[in-house]
Image: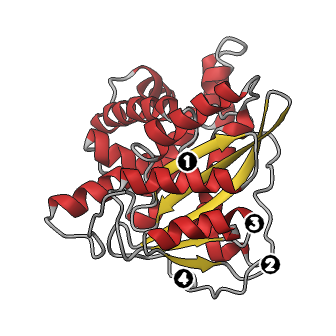
Amino acid sequence: MKAVYDLRYQHALSTLCRVLRVNRSTYYKHFFGAPTPRNIENQEIRKAILEIHLKSDKILGGRKIRAVLLRDYGIAICLPRVYRLIKSMNLPKKQTKGLVGSSFVESLSSDDNKLDQNFKQNSPNLVWVSDVTYIRAGGSWAYLCAVIDLFSRKVIAYRISRKFDADLACETILDALRRRGYPRGLMFHSDRGAQYTAFATRNILDKYDIVQSFSNKGHPWDNAVNESFFRYLKEERTNRDSYRSLDELKLEVFKYIESFYNSYRPHGSIGYLTPDEAERRFYTEGRTPLCVKSITS
């Protein structure tokens, strides 16, 4: 049908319909008839999909767009239909640069892997995971340290510094503790990098009775949740742009985490809720975190 429409000014319509075996009445009905209810509905859904696509900065795929359609627009449709509509819209995608690897793993400690890849937690503030990655800004490397709560996958604290040292990890951990009310009975999991095995870091964790857990040597998947966050950050944001200064990078990471990752982006591992939604539901249901016994700093 589209071929007839595209060639209608180059050949007689009767010839095109005969050669392409298209009934003329079908042609007129398809292109000039009143739109069907299904077509009208599809147009409304396409409009919503375009809004989601632009609001997410051309990041979200079909599954997450479907989740946002239901969450924000009350539109419940099957996944194949979402993919068909996206394909028909030919939405532009942002170009992504080559990925930059995440932080290294060193064997500087003999502590056990107490988490043992148990990434599903049933309460906030049971297990936090942390890691450091690097991103180029202003002609040199900057280092991003993040702390994530495994229950909701929420990034609860993060810091960016030019220095890759224990101070970066310590300051990020202290930020997380302040924001979460200094919970006790917590497990903190990371790789075996020097910033996490340093005396200063271990002293902070000991002060607040936090059990420390380490990934096994050469097993980055033992900290897969943090690795995934860094991958998403780079694929969806930082590898798409260049940053002229550290402040420019800090602003971009702030916008990604606070305005998108924690509050807007659906996560498949938590039922396509956002991290903020997952925690809000937990507290709305009146459940009490298993380890909440706040202390003063």
Q: Which of 33 and 276 is in front in this view?
A: 276
Q: Distance between the residues labelled 2 and 1?
A: 24 Å
Q: Hey, what amino acid is under mark 2?
A: Ser
Which residue reaches farthest left? 286
Which residue position holds label 3? 194
Extreme residue toward the right, this view: 139
Q: How far apart are marks 3 and 1 (CA)?
A: 18 Å
CA gap, disc 4 and disc 1: 21 Å
Which residue is identified by label 1?
Answer: 158
Q: Which amino acid does label 3 sit on?
A: Ala
Identify which residue is drawn at 44% across, 76% down: 120
* Residue 185 seen: yes
Disc 4 versus disc 3: nearer the observer: 3
Task: Residue lying at the far top in this picture: please name it.
Answer: 9
Q: Looking at numbered disc 4 in the image, what kind of residue is underneath it?
A: Leu
44 lies above or below 70:
above
From the top left corner, tell me how far across and down residue 248 is, in percent. 66, 25
Residue at x-position 66% and y-position 35%: 93
Verify CB contact (< 8 Å) between mark 2 and mark 1: no
> Which of marks 3 and 4 precedes in the sequence?
4
- Crowding at label 2, few (<14), some or many (≥20) Cα neighbours within 10 Å? some
Q: Name the residue under label 4.
A: 115
The secondary structure type at the circle numbered 3 is: helix
The disc placed on residue 107 is: 2
Q: How far apart are marks 4 and 3 (CA)?
A: 19 Å
Front one among 261 and 24: 261
Image quarter (top left, top right, bottom left or bottom right) of the N terminus: top right
* Labels 2 and 4: the sequence-earlier one: 2
Q: Is mark 4 on a helix, strand or loop?
A: loop
| Disc 1 residue crowd, few under 14, some 14–19, many 20+, Cα 10 Å | many
Q: Which residue is drawn at 57% across and 68% down?
A: 203
Residue at 43% across / 52% down in the picture? Answer: 266
